[in-house]
Image (tube, rainbow, N blue to C red):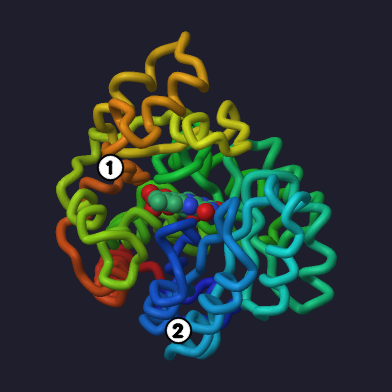
Amino acid sequence: MSVLSTRLTRMWGCDLPVIGAPMAGRAGGELAAAVSAAGGLGMIGVGAATSPEWIRENAETAGTAGGGGNFGIGLMVWNLAEHPEQFEAALAADPTVLSLAFGDPSPWVPEAHRAGISVVAPVNTMPQVREALAADVDVLCVQGTDAGGHTGRVGTMPLMQQVLDYVAVQAPGVPVAVAGGIATGRGLAAVLAAGADAAWIGTALLASSESLGSGELKDAAVAARGRDTALTGIYDRAEQVAWDTATWPTRTVRNGFVDRYAGDPDVTDGELVAARAPGGPYADDLKLHAGQAVGMVLRREPAAETVQRIAADATRLLSRYGRA
Ligand SMILES: Cc1cc2nc3c(=O)[nH]c(=O)nc-3n(C[C@H](O)[C@H](O)[C@H](O)COP(=O)(O)O)c2cc1C
């Protein structure tokens, strides 16, 4: 058996323990299909305003393009009460797995299970771990603060260790994926050696040929360094999105807007809206949500090359240390 075979690859029927993260606005059907076709499991990301039509179309692309029909859909729980049509469209698309992030998944898990769909819950704290396990999710995804996009405040390493220790005793049958800062075979090897079941990667795919977003955004991901990110809620406030930004701030690449306001405790929502409005002083600053792994994004390349390089390097490292 391959050193990369885990409970999760067997559960979700993929060859590699590499999950392509659901990234609203950046991960559509083409990226998900490319990750799945490369042997991992690709997911599409659903944002607050994503339409059911978009979900349907991108799920179809994700599921039919060479990945053996394997793909996932990532939903944001806090948005679903107001937009249950997103959940219905996701179920109808029949993914391998639904990711229910950023909120208590319990109202949505039973229906997904009745439809035969596996459920993974990204978690940022130990109370969220307990909440997700009580909701009977099939898989946990530990998401450290190193991650790009919305995330928590505890680093991947400490959170991973705490969750793996807890799950080993309290829910030994539940596989754990790890998100936040993984972009190379060393990262994948590290989490597998620690006892996790997969790496869940987002930032490493931001400059891929198949990711959504402009060439300018992809070039910016290549140019950014690991020390260039900040954790802040100012974009959600400027865009008037109903995120709980205290619990889930956003890791993003710094620019003039971030440098001006992220550390300003007195800035009002009105000022932030005006700063980003057309004609506002920071209207044209490039919004690039990315994690600390962005310093390891070295070139624009097809997602398959990224996924297969990570897998091959991890295989070599794990074989060297005798994991078999
Ligand atoms: C641009 C961007 C958008 C994201 N959007 C979502 C999302 O819509 N839903 C979600 O569950 N996670 C989202 N995430 C977080 C990812 O699922 C994942 O946890 C993260 O990318 C992993 O860390 P890494 O970026 O260091 O690889 C996003 C991440 C990025 C970089």
Note whether residue 62 is visible. yes
Q: Where does residue 202 sit, x and y in percent of width and height?
A: 39, 57
Of tags 1 and 2, the one toward the viewer is 1
Asked whether 117 or 261 is in front, the reply is 261
Tell me the residue at 25%/27% (across/down): 256
Note whether residue 7 is visible. no
Are there few (<14), some (14-19), or many (20+) residues within 10 Å of tag 2?
Answer: few
Q: CA distance from mark 1 to mark 2?
A: 45 Å
* Circle 2: residue type: Met
Q: Would you say 267 lies left or right of 162 here?
A: left
Q: Where does residue 252 sit, x and y in percent of width and height?
A: 36, 38
Q: Examine the image and state in which quarter residue 119 appears.
A: bottom right
Q: Would you say 166 lies left or right of 136 here?
A: left
Q: Where does residue 109 sit, x and y in percent of width and height?
A: 79, 61
Which quarter of the figure is the C terminus placed in?
Answer: bottom left
**Residue 1, numbered circle:** 2
Reading the image, the residue beneath label 1 is 286
Furthest-top residue in view? 266
